[in-house]
Amino acid sequence: MGNRSSKSESKDEEITYEDTSEGFSEALRINLARLIVYAQSADTGLQREVAERLANEAVKEDRQQQIVELDGLKLLLPLTQSADSEVQRLAAHALANLSVNAENQITMANEGGIEMLINVLDTRNEHVQRQAAKSLANLGVNVANKAKIAQLGGIEPLVTLAGSPYPGVAVEAVAALANLAVNDDNESAIAVAGGLDPILKAAASGNMELQSQAARAMRNLSVNEDNKRMIRKLGGVQIMEDLADSDNERIQQQAKRALNNLRV
């Protein structure tokens, strides 16, 4: 989670939670409104501490919807726009964890989360980029969000990050594009935005997780007839054939499905 910041000197701003589920729930219910005010202040140390705690708690399935129901998004979403990159990263990390929940995916979209996360993709900090792309990948599981992410301009920056020199960033960006490509309009838009080339390069990399996500993306992108022609022209058939011989069963399966699409 990165280096933990020191607590605020002001005693009445200390944040304490009991370790039990009940203790956390009650503390969150009582303190969250106060924390929202604190997190909107200029105290970046406190902002980091609050975002980090919520990111850690949001890993737990039973806390994900609870944090959102108690207005945690009102605290976290504005923090993605912070001038402090560590605050941004922690807030985006918390949102990535919260966005695993299907109900939260809807709520986050309705509360402006997609727009804010797309804005964060343009940051120069690779760790912020990674968490923002991961959040959008999760949000893109939802059918309505697939269209909304595209409508709000999310495809182009994700295509850019798919070619990132940082594997962790590229993995999440390609995963997001793979999810978005299930939508027919997005399938075409990703190709038009230049997404096929960086995804194929990711598929040809030596990074297994990157190859897995790229093979999945190719499977989804290779349904469109125009895309098929472009993928073939870019050498995609050979790349998928190579992945079909991978030792990784998941990569094999996705590559073979992509090849079936390309050969039709």
Image: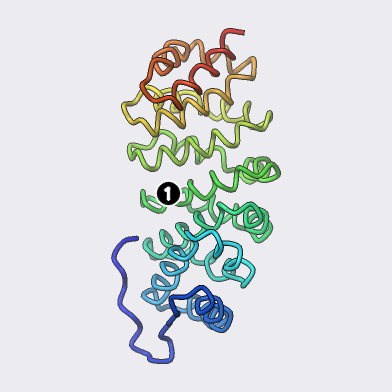
203 left or right of 116? left
Instruction: Name, please, the residue furthest toward the top.
Output: 263
Q: Secondary structure at mark 1?
A: helix
208 left or right of 51? left
Report the amino acid beneath label 1. Answer: Gln
226 left or right of 166? right
Residue in the image at 57% along x and 84% along y: 30
Image position of 125 with respect to 73: above or below: above
Q: Quadrant of the C terminus?
A: top right
Image position of 176 with respect to 200: above or below: below
Residue in the image at 66% along x and 42% along y: 151
Residue in the image at 37% along x and 42% along y: 168
Image position of 221 with respect to 129: above or below: above
- The total of numbered circles placed on residues is 1
Residue in the image at 50% along x and 62% along y: 58
Q: Quadrant of the N terminus?
A: bottom left
Across and down, in percent, residue 44 comes to: 39, 74
Instruction: Name, please, the residue furthest toward the bottom.
Output: 11
Classify 10 Å Cα crowding around label 1: few (below 14), some (14-19), many (20 and above).
many
Q: Quadrant of residue 146?
A: top right
Across and down, in percent, residue 179 comes to: 58, 36
Q: Nearer the viewer, residue 131 or 193?
A: 131
Across and down, in percent, residue 62 comes to: 56, 63
Residue under circle 1? 129
Across and down, in percent, residue 87 comes to: 41, 65
